[in-house]
Amino acid sequence: MYQLQTTNFGKFERHTVSHSLHPQSISFIPSRGGCLLSVVLEGQEVLDGYQTPEEVDFNKWGKSGVLYPFPNRLREGHYEWLGKTYQFPLNDATFHHALHGFGMARPLVVSELSLEEDQAHIGMEGEYAGELPYYPWPFTFGLTYRLHAPDQLWVEMWLKNTGTNPIPVGLGWHPYFQLGDTAAACELILPRMDLVGIDARMIPTGKRYPYTEFSERRKIGSTVLDNCFAVPETHLEVGAYLRGPRGALRYWQETGPDKFNFLQVFTPPYGTSIALEPMTCNVDAFHNGDGLKTLEPGDTLRAKAGIQFLMEE
C-alpha cells in the first residue's frame, strides 16, 4: 500500500509517497513547481536531484523542473504575438537568451491524491492570472506523478488556456538521471532521430541531420551532449535506455500530434548524470514555430513521459 508523508525541508514542505512493501518512493516540493527531489525504484535512487533547500532555492541546472510556457531557449528573450512584442528576462548568462519559461518556481497545490495497493497518483495544479508583462495571458497548469509498483514512475503535465485569446505554448520536463558515480561509465541507447542543427548561440538553424550515434548500446564515455533531437511522430512513444552500475532505466515519452516530439539530451559538466528532457516543441519555438502549439481559449495541451527501473546483471 502506498502512503503519503509530509515533512519540512528548510522553508519548503516536502511530500514523500512510498510503498509499505516495495522499496519505491518519490519526494517532491509542490510549492516549487512540483520539483522532484528523489525517485527510488526497486531500492535504487535514480534521480540526480537537489540535496538541500539552498540548492532548491538557487535552482542551478534546473533539476527536475517543469518547463512552461516554453522549454529550452527563446532567442534573446523576445517574441511577437497578436501584433505585440514581449520581452522575457534573460536568464541564460552564456548566450543571452531566456531559458525554460517560468514554471519551475511557480507554486502548485495538491488537487488529487489516490493511494492504492499497486499504484498511486498525485495531481497538482496552479493558476496563473497573466500577471507577468512578458506573458500576459491566464492559464492553469497541472502536473501528475503516477507510481506503479514496484518499478515505474509516469509524469503527465498539461496546460489549459483559461483566457479569451489564443496563446503560444510549449511544455517540457528537465530530469537528470544517475545510475553510478559517473555518466561516462553508463551505457546509453537513443532512438533513431534527427539532430537539430544549431548555431554558435545554441539556436536552431533550420537544418536537421540523421543521428544514429547511440542507436546501439555503448558507453557515453567522453561524449558531450547538449543537443535537441526531433523524434519520430509515427509511434505512440519513443524510448531510451540507460545502464549503469546500479541498474538500468527504460525512459519513454509520448509522441504524436501535440505530444513530446522533441528530446533534449544534456551531459552536465560535473559529470555524474545525464538529462533526458522531453519537449513538445523545438528550441526557440516562439520564433520558428516548430512544434509550437497555438492554444485556443478553453483548450488543453497535454503530454506524458516515464521511467521504468530494470534489474540487469
Image (spheres, grey):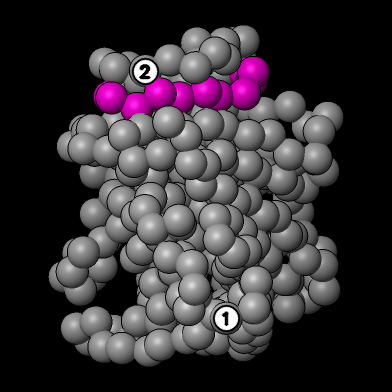
Which amino acid is tagged 2?
Lys
The x, y position of residue 176, in whole percent, is 38, 46
Q: Secondary structure at mark 2?
A: strand
Residue at the spot of label 1: 1
The x, y position of residue 282, in whole percent, is 59, 36
The x, y position of residue 194, in whole percent, is 62, 18
Q: Is residue 89 visible?
A: no
Q: Earlier in the sequence, mark 1 or mark 2?
A: 1
Q: Nearer the viewer, residue 75 or 141?
A: 141
* Relative vertical location of residue 257 with respect to residue 138 in this rendering, above or below: above
17 relative position to 123: left or right: left
Position of the N terminus by quadrant: bottom right
Is 188 magenta? The answer is: yes
Which amino acid is tagged 1?
Met
Residue at the spot of label 2: 219
Instruction: Write down the quadrant of residue 180 in the picture.
Output: top left
Magenta part of the chain: 184-194
The residue at the point 23 percent across, 70 percent down is 57
Numbered label tally: 2
